[in-house]
Amino acid sequence: MNCIFCKIIAGEIPSVKIYEDELVFAFMDIAPINKGHVLVIPKEHHNSSSTVPEETGGRMFHVGSRIGVALKRGLDFEGFNLHLADGTCAGQVVNHAHLHVVPRGVEDGFHWNWRQLEYAEGESAETAERIKSKLKL
Ligand code: AMP
Ligand code: ZN
């Protein structure tokens, strides 16, 4: 399979490793938002986070959070974002599911463009029903 992250796990493409266990691999992002930006990926190839097994997804979140703490303690950041893009329209460029751990400082000059829309009366509940009708766990 022609997947850049699978090649990184296999050691065919170089990376700067932070952590590895039987389920996940964590390494430095080559083009960081802030220096220390890490990616946590499942060792098994999945295009989408939605097909990553629960144990592996849980490990990704756990390892990502602990790396976030290490970014604060080791690099003097004040916080971190965990970010996952699923789908091209959501900003996913590499089609091997990955969790970004982005170190953050109070005045680091980076701003997520996080807009806040408003619901009409009843629209939130109606939208929730449509979501729940398709939710399969
Ligand atoms: P996304 O836009 O969520 O798919 O993120 C893909 C991320 O992979 C970007 O932040 C890239 O900088 C990073 N990336 C791509 N190629 C490499 C590589 N060879 N080594 C490390 N990070 C990479
Ligand atoms: Zn892959």
Image: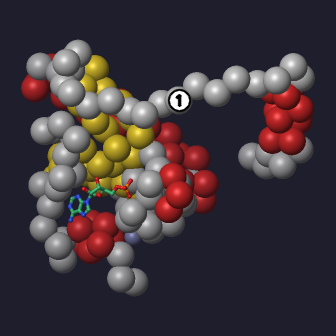
* Residue 38 at x, y percent in the picture: 24, 44
* Residue 102 at x, y percent in the picture: 28, 36
The picture quadrant for ligand 2 comes to bottom left
The quadrant of the image that shows the N terminus is bottom left
- Residue 106 in sight from this viewpoint: yes
Left or right of residue 73: residue 2: right
Quadrant of the rendered image containing residue 121: top right
Left or right of residue 68: residue 131: right
The residue wearing badge 1 is: 115
* Residue 16 at x, y percent in the picture: 12, 55
- Residue 72 in sight from this viewpoint: no
Type of amino acid under label 1: Arg
Rendered residue at 47%/50% (across/down): 85
Quadrant of the rendered image containing residue 93: bottom left
Position above or below: 47 against 17: below
Position above or below: 85 against 14: above
Quadrant of the rendered image containing residue 59: top left
* Residue 6 at x, y percent in the picture: 33, 71
Does label 1 point to a residue whose CB lies under 8 Å from ligand 1?
Answer: no
Q: Secondary structure at mark 1?
A: loop
